[in-house]
Amino acid sequence: MKEFFENVQKKTARHPLLSCFLAAILLNLFVELLSRRSFISLAVFVGTRPHIFLFNACIIFWSFSLLLLVRRKLFLSAVISVIWLILGIVNFVLLGCRVTPFNGADLRLTKDAMAVAGKYLSWWHLVLLAIAVAALIVALVILFRKLPRSGKKPSYIKSLIFVVFSFMALLGINSVGKSTGVLANQFGNLAQAYQDYGFSYCFANSLINTGISKPGDYSTEVVKEIKKEEIVPEEHVSAPLVVENRPDVVNEQGVAVTEKTPNIIFLQLESFSDPLKYLHMECSEDPIPNFRKLMEQYSSGYLWVPSVGAGTANTEFEVITGMNLDFFGPGEYPYKTVLQKQVSESICFDLKEIGYHAQAIHNNSGTFYDRYTVFSQLGFDTFTSLEYMTGYDTTYMGWAKDEILTEQIAKVLNSTSGADVIYTISVQGHGSYPQEKVLDSPVVQVTGLPTEGETNAMEYYVEQIHEMDTFVGELISYLESRDEETILVMYGDHLPSLNLTEDKLENGDLFQTEYVIWDNMGLARTSRNVEAYQLGAYVMDKAGLKKGTMFRYHQAYLQKTSHTAEEEETYLNDMKILEYDILYGDQDVFEGEMPYEATNLHMGVQPISINRVLLQNKGLYVTGWNYTKNSVIYVNGKAWETNCVSQNLLYAADVKLKEGDNEITVGQVSDDNIVLSVSEPYVLKQEKKDGSGGS
């Protein structure tokens, strides 16, 4: 074996660059085959776009140029090959679960992916994965020990010059390709971009290209011109609502606000869609009768969303901020990039100027997509996540059912005396959708699919959205019973990951869900298709509210029902300028200073507090209010394994208090061990060294 590797090294040493390029070609063929999942599709790509294929191979070839810098050339070539193979395999697996290919943004979601892996992979999948990782590590260790080293010391200066030069050459080719239109400047459809421009190029692009690139015509003068000509005035325009004096709410000039402010509730329904519009199957009955009836009676239409099969947070981002994700990096999640440190204009900040309270609700973990920190950058005052809920049921796959959200919305509405803007994110419809039979008697039977596995998966999905539709009906009934004017906006965040294609959909668009705007104020019914980033502006316009830069910008555009190609191009170009200015530029639209500050986000709307602490038989009993299964007892900052007996009682066994252990708190802790909030401390008045006693 050693002689074999030595012969390989000698042969490759004679023509190192040619050997690396051939290896790059082979690897490129493999990752493209995995990406396209078809030999025919691969052949078409290579045959019709050979220049793109070779450019992708050159990207892989550049990674092999690093071999010139080391003596263990065979080992490093093995490592590089394994990395590319892993990238291709991961992309192949992900494309089996969703439409969006593997991209750089996914690397920032590793923690979130680990949290939900159990819902997509069975235990034996996880065992096989662990075995594969262990085998790979062992193999690399063996290769490191067995593969020969080059007897000749590398010429580091020459090699480094070649590595840098080849990298600059790639950048040059990339620049020329974009300027000539051979390569795309932006990926409006990431899945299609991978098909058109290859895996290696698109993945590398997604690693490097984040944020919004500075527009060529960006300047203070241009921003001011856009503000003057393309944004509707902020003054209150005649609204379809009764005007009510609000002397308790004043603007920055101290003038009483006189706008009627109804509650505005956004309900983002996880993977919600209309199965009756799937052309490749039939349902025994209407799975979403409530939603369909609402669409017939209230304003509704199609909603263009930025992703398919995944990407809830990005639909959320567009609706909350009014910003178009097309201008960001490929597959980028702003929650994981710019919003980690930067505050952004949002519907929350804008409506709070006229007295609204901004609240968020999600029946999943508060740490997912870093919402527990990001929501403060978007102006939310409170965030009620699953860690603050009790009494909920879960689906077969372990997701909380949406019926709990009616109670949570009620708690939020009852927690304030003024108007609320509430962003509610559901989770019940989340994948994956099991292909084995898990429902004994589904309410809606599905027929027409080619395999039993596909039928089982679809029936499971349809069952979930049928239950979500029932929840929608219950929520409407509750809101009708309240004596408060309310607008409820409901929509699917994206289509489900069920191998849907455009030819299987009645509307022929994978990036469209549906929305409906219910109200109890008699607003005029309209039918219009809108983008997710236009939805907030559209709703505010119906309420007669002209607030915020991005939202008033969209309101000006939406005043017309049709536009010329030139008008649309201007609209998109100037939108990019505004987004860049707000998040990355000089904030000229705000006269050079960001008017918003991150909020002190309060987790939950009901205070978690301690009434009494009792130490008895080495068990610590804590009584109080609003405890959940995520409540944890802390003694002087040390966590104890806690059992939630009820909403009013927590218990920790085998607690031994040392001298000075007298401060008790209750923390709400996520399943990934992040402390979301901590109660006010309770100080023990009596202590006993034997560990018994209480107060």
Image: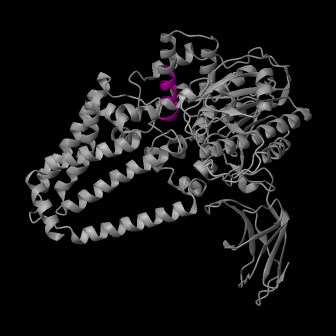
Q: Nearer the viewer, residue 343 or 37?
A: 37
Relative to 673, say whether 349 is above or below: above
What residue span does the magenta drawing correspond to? Answer: 574-585
Q: Position of residue 107 (x, y in %)?
A: 46, 50
Residue 396 occupies quadrant: bottom right
* Residue beneath the point at 68% across and 55% down: 398
* Residue beneath the point at 67% across and 48% down: 600
Secondary structure that dominates the magenta span: helix
Q: Is residue 225 left or right of residue 626?
A: left
Q: Position of residue 37 (x, y in %)?
A: 41, 41
Task: Tell me the quarter of the image containing the N terminus.
Answer: bottom left
On the question of residue 55 being in view, the answer is yes
Q: Is residue 297 left or right of residue 9?
A: right
* Residue beneath the point at 48% across and 15% down: 570
* Residue beneath the point at 53% across and 42% down: 98
Q: Position of residue 652 (x, y in %)?
A: 76, 75
Relative to 164, say whether 240 is above or below: above
